[in-house]
Amino acid sequence: MDRLKFAVLLICMVLVACGFYSMAGSIPPHIKTVAIPLMDNETAEFGLAEALTDGLLERFNEEGVLDIADELRAHSILRGTVKKVHEGPYTYSKTESVSEYRYKIDVRLVWYDVKQEKNLLEGTYSGFGAYGLSGDIASDGIDNDNDGKIDSEDDDEFGEPRTFATQVAVRKIAEDILNDIMTTW
């Protein structure tokens, strides 16, 4: 009899704990879809708004958290504005010349609940990528995507350095936004 009581108590505790966890990290139940219109761009960087919008769409599709819909049918809308791009020296060599540049993007974002007509999330998000001047990120001695791997150890570092730094920054921003949306509730 004591074993049965213990088993029932244990099951109840697990169910309560799981129920609390899933409620704390869930999106409001009436929101099943999100629209992600083309971001605005207040910078001179051509194609950056498109890259960020595409990066968000890609991450949402990969995670499958919310279905993507057009603005007329969506339960929520994720609007963003590229506010600023900063590019500057990141590290220096022993001779005090720049050996690595940092490319940083700042985005202002609002996640809007269409049904309740209120903002669910507002904030500024930043992401950066690093690159050198060698022209070949596969052999520049830099951890371009900040994953702890350099050159031959890192099989995803290839392409034009500044373009790759932009992709890394976009991916970081998209991941941070998605994480915040999933953990806000």
Image (cartoon, rainbow, N blue to C red):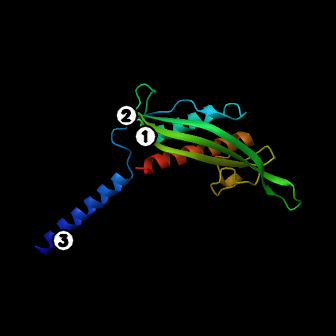
Q: Is there any visible trace of residue 164 in the rendered image? A: no
Q: CA distance from mark 3 to mark 2?
A: 45 Å
Q: As drawn, is 148 to the left or to the right of 132?
A: left
Q: Is there any visible trace of residue 89 in the rendered image? A: yes
Q: Compare residues 141 and 168 and report the one nearer the observer.
A: 168
Tell me which corner region of the image, top left, top right, bottom left or bottom right, holds residue 173.
Answer: top right
Q: Which mark is residue 93?
A: none
Residue extending farthest to the bottom is 2
Q: Position of residue 170 (x, y in %)?
A: 61, 42
Q: Earlier in the sequence, mark 3 or mark 2?
A: 3
- Crowding at mark 2 (Cα within 10 Å: few <14, some 14-19, many 20+): few
Quadrant placement of the N terminus? bottom left
Q: Position of residue 119 (x, y in %)?
A: 46, 40
What residue appears at the point 17 percent right and 65 percent down from the top-left corner? 8
State the count of labels: 3
Q: Which residue is mark 3?
A: 6
Q: Which residue is mark 2?
A: 115
What residue appears at the point 68 percent right and 41 percent down from the top-left corner? 84
- Crowding at mark 3 (Cα within 10 Å: few <14, some 14-19, many 20+): few
Q: Earlier in the sequence, mark 3 or mark 1?
A: 3
Q: Which mark is residue 64?
A: 1
Q: Amino acid at mark 1?
A: Gly
Vertical position of residue 41 compared to residue 21: above or below? above
- Crowding at mark 1 (Cα within 10 Å: few <14, some 14-19, many 20+): few
What residue appears at the point 54 percent right and 38 percent down from the top-left corner? 56
Give the SS element for disc 3.
helix
Q: In front of the other: label 3 or label 2?
A: 2
Q: Position of residue 151 (x, y in %)?
A: 71, 52
